[in-house]
Amino acid sequence: MLDLARLRALHAVSVHGSVAAAATALGYTPSAVSQQITKLERETRTTLLERRGRGVALTEDALHLAATAQELLALVERAETTLEERRGLPTGRLTVAAFATAARGLLPGVLAQLAREHPDLDTRLSEIDPHLSIDLVAKGVVDLAVTHDWDIAPLPAPEGVEHAVIGDDLCDLLVPKDHRLAGRRSVRRAELAREHWICQPPGSVCHDWLVRTLRADGYEPDLRHQAAEYHTQLALVSHGLGIALIPRLGRGPLPDGVVAVRLEPAPVRRLYALWRTGAARRPAITAAVSALQSQWPTAAPPPVRL
């Protein structure tokens, strides 16, 4: 009989693309994942992983087995959901994926609330980019994801995944304190044509939003510096190296030398919670979504000016 834990390890490698990434997702060490797969190879008398360059790749047999593992894991999830629903209390393990600023600005309060109200619920958080977490929910790798979208990039809606709105996260224009716009109550995008911008790297939703939005106003933005971390962007702004457009969630206090100005119209990213349809009845999902929505007013920073 095939061992479910070993099938879970193989499935994780197929989803994440490497033993190390699978180990991170499962909360194991890479050696533990490798041992699980080695034992599965002995059980099936089949080679499942083969060396390819510096990494490993799944064989054709392994891909077939991983697909079967996904079906089995879905059956197990339905059984666990039914049992948890019959008990009527959030229990078991709940894996949550959240993007960086949500993990910093929203999830600590949510996790603390769940720990207080549901001590039998074992909640585990992983910081994962939004464009990856939706697929991980759909494939059953994580139970719940906190993600976001912008007006130019609506939230994908894969089959078998449900979602609920958490709240709207506004963005502010951040400028050096001696900048010509620092004393303004608000500013329109057309006034920013000659500015030096600090932004996220290409390929991120925030970068694409900035470029496409400013191009729509008739000019090509001058992207001087690119940094994935908002705190790095803030440091660059504080030294007078450019301006940035940064969401409020998880931003923290502004450093000395940085002033927030309202941009009109105000850019907004909407936060969502996502889960699989098959787990919708699970009390743990209901409790987590409720906690996310109840914590949002506290997590979302107030406007910079009234």
Image (spheres, rainbow, N blue to C red):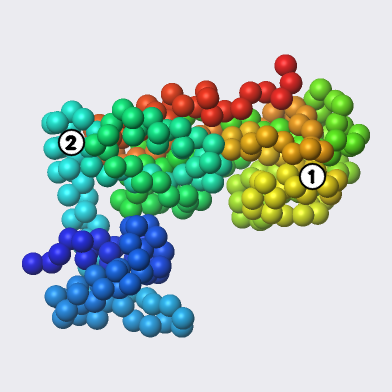
Identify whether 209 is placed above or below 202. above
The residue nearer to you, when weighing 158 against 42, is 42
- Kind of element beneath mark 1: helix
Percent x, y of residue 212: 70, 45
Query: Does residue 225 appear to the left or right of 71 in the view shown?
Result: right
* Rendering quarter of residue 162: top left
| Residue drawn at x 36%, y 46% as measured from the top left | 124
The residue nearer to you, when weighing 275 against 3, is 3
Residue 164 visible in the snapshot: no
| Residue drawn at x 18%, y 56% as measured from the top left | 72
Percent x, y of residue 189: 79, 34
Q: Quadrant of the C terminus?
A: top right
Query: Does residue 77 appear to the left or right of 250 in the view shown?
Result: left
Residue 260 visible in the snapshot: yes
Q: Mark 2 points at which residue?
A: 84
Percent x, y of residue 111: 40, 36
Q: Name the residue under label 1.
A: 237
Identify whether 98 is placed above or below 169. below
